[in-house]
């Protein structure tokens, strides 16, 4: 059988997590239109009798000066150097940027097969697709370049077959029944962070961390979840809570609904908002919130 790991890399908002979710057939990564949605390497596992593909969804390449962002970028580059195959994702709808080409060229220097997926072609002007593919083929040394739409399913199966063709022969990398390496507890925290990303604008989502203090299933089948939402400034806390707690109540409602869908059971959710100034540049807090350098 074919089996191996695929590093999914690219600039922020390229559509990496959406593509991984569609390829795996399960939601293993949260999705939002904001940069830095994915902060950690997240494994998504697709297993059949003939193959196992372990997708490694990585943080988007994004210019920012915080210690957290530096660690995120290192995660993406380290992942690409440790896998059997690299899939570089480019947002076709956003237009081909020089930065896309530069980053793709950097990642193409790895010693493993290198594929490029031009995503979001369903909302990209059709007349621009051929020339974009030509430019990519001229500027980037890739084994394969394929236009895809995760949302519409266009060329997703073709991409999957291409990935399989480049993977080595071998046994299972992960348990055949697994779809991710992340625990339910981790995903519950990510679901809350996803709703915050979707609810709030500007700097607030990037300065938010989520910690799950308690996660357990009661005898009656209901999950009790206790979460801290950590932000960097007192005025951010006020915005997240909102007037008479309205904003936080809305986030809690959306998060709880998604948690219940994910867990297949009722959820009793308690949320507190705390301020930890400049936590993204404090090694002690980065470690506490799960972003340690030696993770």
Image (cartoon, helix red, strand yellow):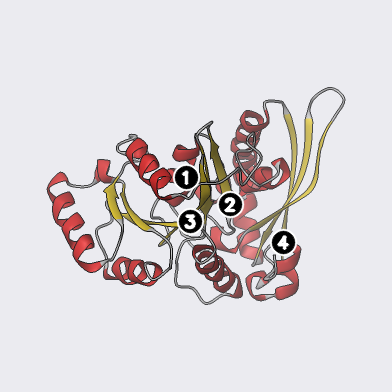
- Asked whether the residues under the numbered discs 1 and 2 touch, taking CB atoms below 8 Å apart as contact, a structural biologist would say yes
Residue drawn 43% across the image and 62% down it: 112
Between 217 and 55, the one lying in front of the other is: 55
Residue 201 — which label?
Answer: 3
Left or right of 224? Residue 168 is: left
Which residue has dot 2 on it?
42
- Asked whether the residues under the numbered discs 4 and 3 touch, taking CB atoms below 8 Å apart as contact, a structural biologist would say no
Q: Please tell me whether residue 105 is drawn above or below residue 16 in the rendered image.
A: below
Q: Quote the CA–CA distance across marks 1 and 2.
A: 10 Å
Q: Position of residue 131 (x, y in %)?
A: 14, 56
Q: Quote the CA–CA distance across marks 4 and 2.
A: 16 Å
Q: Quote the CA–CA distance across marks 3 and 2.
A: 25 Å
Q: Disc 1 or 4, which lies upstream in sequence?
A: 1
Which residue has dot 4 on it?
289
Q: Secondary structure at mark 1?
A: helix
Q: Please tell me whether residue 202 is drawn above or below residue 16 in the rendered image.
A: below
Residue farthest toward the left in the current orientation of the protein: 127
Residue drawn 26% across the image and 45% down it: 121
- Asked whether the residues under the numbered discs 1 and 3 touch, taking CB atoms below 8 Å apart as contact, a structural biologist would say no
Q: Position of residue 172 (x, y in %)?
A: 61, 43
- Mark 4 or 3: the one toward you: 4
**Mark 2 packing: few (<14 Cα in 10 Å), some, or many (20+)?**
many
Residue farthest toward the top in the current orientation of the protein: 220
Q: Disc 4 or 3, which lies upstream in sequence?
A: 3
Q: Quote the CA–CA distance across marks 4 and 3.
A: 22 Å
- Mark 3 or 2: the one toward you: 2
Q: Secondary structure at mark 4?
A: loop
Which residue has dot 1 on it?
20
**Mark 1 packing: few (<14 Cα in 10 Å), some, or many (20+)?**
many
**Mark 3 packing: few (<14 Cα in 10 Å), some, or many (20+)?**
few
Whether residue 27 is visible here, answered yes or no, is no
């Amino acid at each position: 059988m074919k089996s191996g790991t695929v590093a999914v890399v690219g600039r922020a908002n390229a559509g990496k997590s959406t593509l991984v979710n569609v390829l795996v057939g399960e939601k293993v990564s949260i999705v939002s239109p904001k940069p830095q949605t994915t902060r950690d390497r997240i494994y998504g596992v697709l297993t059949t009798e003939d193959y196992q593909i372990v997708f490694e969804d990585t943080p988007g390449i994004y210019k920012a000066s915080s210690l957290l962002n530096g660690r995120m970028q290192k995660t993406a580059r380290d992942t690409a150097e440790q896998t059997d195959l690299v899939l570089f994702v480019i947002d076709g709808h956003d237009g081909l940027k020089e930065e896309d080409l530069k980053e793709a060229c950097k990642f193409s220097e790895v010693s493993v097969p290198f594929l490029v997926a031009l995503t979001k072609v369903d909302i990209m002007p059709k007349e621009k697709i051929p020339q974009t593919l030509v430019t990519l083929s001229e500027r980037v040394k890739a084994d394969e370049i394929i236009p895809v739409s995760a949302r519409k399913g266009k060329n997703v199966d073709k991409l999957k077959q291409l990935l399989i063709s480049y993977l080595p022969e071998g046994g299972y990398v992960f348990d055949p029944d697994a779809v991710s390496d992340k625990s339910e507890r981790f995903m519950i925290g990510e679901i809350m962070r996803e709703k915050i990303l979707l609810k709030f604008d500007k700097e607030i989502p990037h300065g938010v961390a989520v910690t799950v203090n308690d996660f357990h299933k009661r005898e009656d089948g209901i999950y009790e979840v206790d979460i801290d939402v950590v932000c960097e400034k007192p005025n951010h806390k006020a915005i997240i809570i909102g007037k008479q707690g309205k904003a936080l109540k809305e986030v809690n409602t959306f998060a709880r609904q998604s948690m219940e869908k994910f867990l297949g059971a009722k959820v009793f959710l308690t949320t507190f908002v705390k301020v930890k100034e400049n936590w993204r540049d404090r090694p002690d807090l980065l470690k506490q919130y799960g972003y340690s350098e030696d993770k």
